Every structure is written in C-alpha cells, then in structure tokens.
Amino acid sequence: MNKVTIVAYHYVRDLKFSRYPQIKGLDTVFFKEQIVFFKKNYNIITMEQLIDSIDKNKALPDKSLLLTFDDAYIDHFTQVFPILVENKIQGSFFPPAKAIRDHTLLEVNKIHHILASNTEAAYIKYEIFMLMDEYRNEFGLKSNEFYYDLLAIADRFDTADVIFIKRLLQRGLPEKLRNRITNKLFEKFIGLPETVFSRELYMTIDQIKMMYKAGMHIGSHGFDHYWLDSLPYIEQEHEITKSLEFLKQIGVDISNWTMCYPYGGYNQLTINLLKKYNCKLALTVDLGIAEVSTENRYILPRLDTNDLPKDRYAALNEWYQEA
C-alpha cells in the first residue's frame, strides 16, 4: 500500500521581528532547515502524484512526503512560497474563502492573536469569566467552573488554561455568545479594526492566483471555516459549493479539487457531499502517516511540523521509521 507523510503548517514567519512573536508558529529559519532535512531523507511529492496514486493506482516513491499549508496567511506568500520555488517543491495551500474574499477574520485567528498579545492566559480566562457572568442569564449559562472542568484539558502543545480558552471560544458556548466575547477580547487586547487586521494577516486573491500559476496546489478549506460536522447537510453543502466558487475564481482545475477540513471537523454527511461533488481527497488533523487507498481518500491524517525535525542534521525519528 502507498504511504505518504503529510505535513501541516500554519504560521511560518520571522517570529522575533513579527508583530506577535508569541504566536504559535514556525520560525522561517527552522522552516528552511526542515526543507533541507526533508530533501535529504524523503521524496517530496506533488498533490497530483497523490491523486494519481489513488485514482490510477500509481506507485508513490518510498518515503513520500507532501507539504500542506492551512489558512492562506500572508506568511505563506512572503516566507514560504519563495523557499518552495527555490527548492522546486510544490506546496498545497488551503485558503478560507470568505476571510480572503471579504477581508474578515476567522474567529480562530482572533483567538490565536488574543493569546499571543503578551497577556497571561490566566488573565484572559479571568476576562472571559467576567463576560460570562454578564451574559449568564441571557444565554442560560452554567457556572464558570462547569465549563472549565469540562474543557481545560492540557494537550501536547498547550496548557490547560490555553486549551480552555480555545475550546470555549471555538465550540463550548453558543455561536452568538462566542462571537460576542471574542470580539470584545479582540478589541481589548488587539485594538485594530477587523478589516485592517485581515488585510495584514491573509494573502490576497491575486497572490493566491500567482502561486497557483507557479505550480502550487490550491484546495478548499470551506467558505466560512465552520466545523463541518456541526452543520446539517444543507449548510455543509453550502460551505462546499461556495468554496468551489472561490476556487473557480482563482482559476483552479475543479476536476482535481481537494479538501482540508476546517478544524479537522467532518462526518459521514461531509464525505457523502465530497463524493457528490467529485472531490479527489480530503485531509484531517488526525495524527499519523497516511496509508493511501480509495477507501480512506477522505480521511487522510497528517503530522504537525513540530512532529518532525527542524534541523538538517537531526536524527531520524519514529515517524520516519513508520513512513
């Protein structure tokens, strides 16, 4: 069976000299080192090769590796794109359509930058609790302790307080209240208009078009960047069809389109819709090396950049042995 190591990236920037050096991102220096490591130890493939391995049963090279980049940050154009071109590597990029088209901000990016605003997570949590107290009766909220005990579970990258803030503001509260609280926190800790910040954070349509014409792969990351598994069938279909309209605007060959699930959220309804609209494959946030087949083409796992070495001279780790 064909195997491929699919690597997921988000922020890639010169962190020390960026506006938010505390953001959870990869420094450009380490990205360059990781590319050298990959070229030395893996065979970096294109998205088209991966699609052909499924559709045409073509063999992939041993130790195949695919680079993917979520959310269309400006970093991907200014930092990543030149490095990929220099090294003759294709990257696969997944822009959230509405944020790019309408110059809005993804709620998740508001949360990231609130957390990166050089403010202690404990203080942000305190501000959230104050706002929850204010809205408790209007939204019928349970106690603050109830939500904290339910959601504050540290993971391999974040503390319990950080996880609590992310989960509460992404899914733990009603959408209307989540947005209201997030906007108040963004105004307090960031203090820039959303349209201004959006233009700083994301690529433009013209930049995405330029990357596509240069051989990069551009796929779907939804329209509103919703958790698709939280939506009924008709709303999921709207998310997919609107994102396909955006891809057509970019000039993407829709006969070879791919999906990267926002937040990794999908269910059987999502997969049924991807089949209906002839999606070639879909990427999750599940951790692992992808075993490629027609049966699992819509549930391909990925590794985070932090799961792999960021030093050209680093020793091979367990993920290499599994690849």
Image: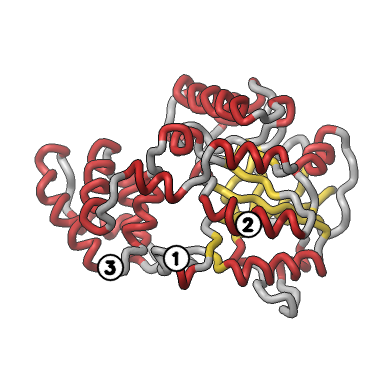
Mark 1, secondary structure of its residue: loop
Residue at the image position 73 percent from the left and 75 percent from the top: 312
Give the label on residue 80, or none: 2
- Crowd around label 1: few <14 · some 14–19 · many ≥20 (10 Å): few
Q: Quadrant of residue 271?
A: top right
Residue 275 shown left or right of residue 261 in the figure:
right
Specify which label sits upstream in the sequence, 2 or 3.
2
Mark 2, secondary structure of its residue: helix
Up-down relation of residue 66 to residue 105 (above or below): below
Q: Are marks 2 and 3 in contact (CB under 8 Å)?
A: no
Q: Quadrant of residue 121?
A: bottom left
- Crowd around label 2: few <14 · some 14–19 · many ≥20 (10 Å): some
Residue at the image position 16 percent from the left and 52 percent from the top: 143
Residue 304 at x, y = what percent? 60, 60
- Disc 2 versus disc 1: distance between alpha carbons? 15 Å
Up-down relation of residue 163 to residue 136 (above or below): below
**Amino acid, disc 1:** Ser
Give the label on residue 18, or none: 1
Q: Is residue 269 visible?
A: no
Up-down relation of residue 210 to residue 190 (above or below): above
**Amino acid, disc 2:** Val
Task: Quickly name the residue at label 3.
Answer: 119
